[in-house]
Image (cartoon, coloured by chain):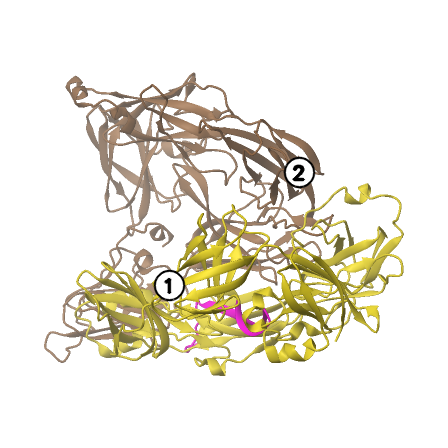
Amino acid sequence: MIRKLLWCVMIAGTASAQMPVANQAFHISGRMVDALTGKPLSKIVVAIGKPQDSEVTQSVTTGADGGFVFNGLSQGKYWLVAEGKGISRQGYQEHGFYSTAIAVGPQLESDNIEFRVHPDSSIAGVITDQNNEPVRDAQVMLFRRGLENGKRRTVMQEEANTNDEGQYHFSHVRGGTYFLVVSAKPWYAQYVQGIMQQPGFRNQDHRAALDVVYPVTYYPGSTDMSNAAPITVRAGERVSADMTLTAEPAQHFTVSDPDAESEQGMNVLVQQRVFDGFTINLQAQTIANSPGEVEVTGVPAGHYRMQFESYGKHSTTREQEVEVSNGAEVRASGSITPAEVSGILKRTSAGGEPIVRLTNIATGEIFDGPVGKKGEFTIDSETLAPGKYEVGILNLDPAVVMQVTASGARASGQIVEISAGGAVRLTVTLAEQLSRVDGVALRDGKGRGGAMVMLVPQDMEHNVSLARRDQSDSDGTFSLFAVPPGKYTVIAIENGWELEWRDRAVIAPYLRNGTPITVSPGHKENITVTVQ
Amino acid sequence: MTSLLRCRSLLLYLILGCGLSAHAQQGSSSSSFTISGTVVNSVSGEPIRGALVQVVSGMPDAVLTDGDGRFQFDDQPNPQASLIAHKPGFLNDADTLAINQSQSFPAQVRPQTGPVVIKLTPQGVISGRVLDETGEPIEDLPVKLIYVHIVDGRKRWEQRSTTVTNPEGAFRFADLTPGSYYVKAGPSAVAAFISRHEDAFGAVFYPSPPGVAGASPLHVGVGERVEADFSLKSEPVYKVSGVVAGLAEGQGAGLQVMDEFGDVVPAPIEMGPGAGSFQLRVPGGRYFIRAWVQGADRVQRWAEQTLRVQSDMNNLRLVPVTSAVIPVAIRTEFSNKSLRVLQAAGRPFQAATVRLVPQGPALAGSDVYAGTRFVPGQPAELAFQNVPPGKYELAINPNGNWYVQSARMGDVDALQDELNIPSGGSLPPLEIVLRDDGGSLTGTVQADGPETWCQVIVVPDSNRSQVRTQTIGTGAQFDFSNLAPDGYSVFALNSAEGLQYAEVGALDSYLGNAAHVVVPAHGQQSVKVNLTRAGSQ
């Protein structure tokens, strides 16, 4: 079952009273246990509701043995959700947006459910400097390695700042693999900058000791990302992770814009890449030397991505990779980022205020363009970096992007690959008649719950946004929504939730035993799929 | 020492005199010197390592102290230099810098001074844990720090910072200047919880009895670490639903729930279905609920109701009424009639800043300022608009050489009495009279012992609500101008926090020993007063 509005729960105070008296012979019962230890969990609230809406129809608290019972249920499906002290809200067999609903009715097994829940974990620690003094106001970033849209990525989860004792903490952390990254400034940096700019500051030893910065540091204490150590957090665990930052000399370098005219100014943004396209903006200081030239300081030696924003008569944004060292003279010669990404949306319906959205596949950055009356749109592309983008449509339900063609860029399926410079014009074709595919996932002829069900389009690489997923409910049934017309293969995989399904090689072996299907516009399909 | 901490403006640089003979050494050139010293914790005397010491006048230089708190600047060419020091967790030097036990200011170094000792005053910390009735820590509970200070002779509460408890139920407020603080824990955020029956924690002040009356302030001295542990009892969460009456379909309303301290409660409020209907959930307790609606005429209407939530409450009906509009008329009286000619039309508008200071629950609302009100077809007027109902005190700050002669609202003497603003209804205008024939009063404070801060308090004979104060060093002169012609009692108090003179009877014990002086119209008087040590009268 896909989680739609679920868990934005409203309490229906009178729902159970209004239920029809007849046909209430069914029940759901089970036991709640700690997913890690298998121990029963008492005093945890369990609630059920109908998949069609998010209202709780019944809620109970688990007993000393972890047991829970819901009686007097009418035939149908119910979602199951738990929440309590140290237990963040979670669904039964939850996998991200998906969970298994319990089907109740004649010949359906809805008792003896083992509801395995994952208690919250925490990560906490102290950030100190090389003199063992606490670093206050350090920015501590928590990254999690996991599957995102079928791809294994390391994604920023949460951010915390250290207090006056250098302490930080992340509570309500799920079990998993994490990385910690710390970005901070020495506390005296705020005073030092002004002091050292005073004419007459001659003491070079003092200058060197104060003109320092902390490099971005990875747990357990390296400034090199390849030495970042994963922190494995198990459900319910309290992990302690302390770090020490070591100050390094701040580098001073100049950036010049060869095309600068008088009156032209420049902003310099120094970004450090961390995991999977995530960048940290370093707090560099810039001083304008002359038109088209700035002096930059406040960053340690290293390799950065820089953005040079020239403003004045002509505004351009250039991007390039820069190796920073003392006295370096950087020429802003990187290619100018796309001047314009615009296009036309082809649709049969009228009205609404649709938005075309480009999502950078590597970084997840999004760029939107509202669509005008004649279908024309222009993407706000000032910081749109070269790369692969997925094209989607917003505010137009039901509709999905079927096909993108482009001039000035390469396009296939819903993917467009934009290179630097020049204008890009897109033609976006929609599918506006969508279908629903229902089915049942079978194993040994019986409905199987908890399997990952996936509708795989042809040429998956360029049509990922047409893929649909669901988790089979306790009777094996599933529903795949908003499917555009076309040829697909539906597969069901037991324990399939950790698969990198975006990788063709991973998914290909399953396709042979999948169920091929041709979806025609506005049709409702009903199929069976074998669980592999 | 504490009295010194109050005044930020106090200039306290460390000035090293030209004849630093005891320590200044001949440098490489004949006229250069070396300055060295230590930065220490003013309370413990322990050296502070890693403090930033900066030469602010003299040759620019800066250095971090070593492991023993020591610093040294060589080759200082100038015969005089000023130093300042910084370190997180310590008050900024300009507030507190003192050297060699000297408590006076400005800090002077005698030529015989040895190595310099810069004292930094540690900041205070309030920390604690919040536990439930079973001794389990409460996580994610909001905790607020409220600073208490005296403004216009009255205690005012000012929210300084907020935090939430960690998984151990612990919270911490660091970097506190010495003073009095209240700590408020809760209420817990009532989330859209899946349970039908839910408990949550209401708001309490340390040391956690119910109600405002039980709250007691925590006094944080210089560098003190104060513990404030709470034990909270959970309350069932109840549903409160009702309707804001008189709303058209699709018309919105603002809705706010405040606890009995006047603090907004983070209760989930759902509007609809149906015009003006709402429902919200709060832990059992006392609340105010307030609704406001802005009509097409841009006039705000308010409804306010006190709630005592002990069970689910349905069918609450809030009827917004037009908020009070109080026209303000400022009359300026000139002692010299020829001056009046110079007064341009509309000038009385700007003659004073007029505001209403809420007197309700401790944390309730901000001051309401009188502003320009446009009425179609009529000249703009000065008025209080959109005044939430409640009790207020009037504050008038003349802009120029005026004093407040009188302020009346109907039968009420607005200078003496609280103004009770009802919800809606027409109110008589507030009539303020300003005059320009005030006199001035200057003087000095006689004090034994080292110089210190004091508050000079001037109380008119005929109207004790029009007290004026100044905070000065005991060596300086005070100077009050635009005083209404009257007799005045004048005294000086070495209270660090200031006197709550607006409280009934607060002045009584001081007036007996006060100097008395009559300030005539346009007159200039001077007076010498003796310093009264707080608690010694």
Q: In the rendered view of the protein, which quadrant contains the N terminus of chain B?
A: bottom left
Instruction: Check residue B163 for magenta coloring.
Output: no
Is mark 1 in CB contact (under 8 Å) with mark 2? no
| Display colour for chain A | yellow
Mark 1 vs mark 2: which is more N-terminal? 1
**Chain in brown colour:** B
Q: CA distance from mark 1 to mark 2?
A: 54 Å
| Same subunit, tags 1 and 2 | yes
Between residues A102 and B460, which one lies in front from this camera angle? A102
Q: In the rendered view of the protein, which quadrant contains the C terminus of chain B?
A: top left
Mark 1: give few (<14), some (14-19) or many (20+) Cα within 10 Å: many
Subunit that carries the residue with mark 2: B
Instruction: Check residue A147 for magenta coloring.
Output: yes
Quarter of the view holding residue B319: top right
Q: Is residue A276 left or right of residue A478?
A: left
Q: Which secondary structure dominates the residues rendered in magenta?
A: strand
Q: Which residue is mark 1?
A: B42
Q: Residue furthest bottom?
A: A227
Subunit that carries the residue with mark 1: B
Between residues A331 and B439, which one lies in front from this camera angle? A331
- Residue A382 vs B209, above or below: the answer is below
Please report the residue visible at 15 percent of the width from the left and 66 percent of the height from the top: B18
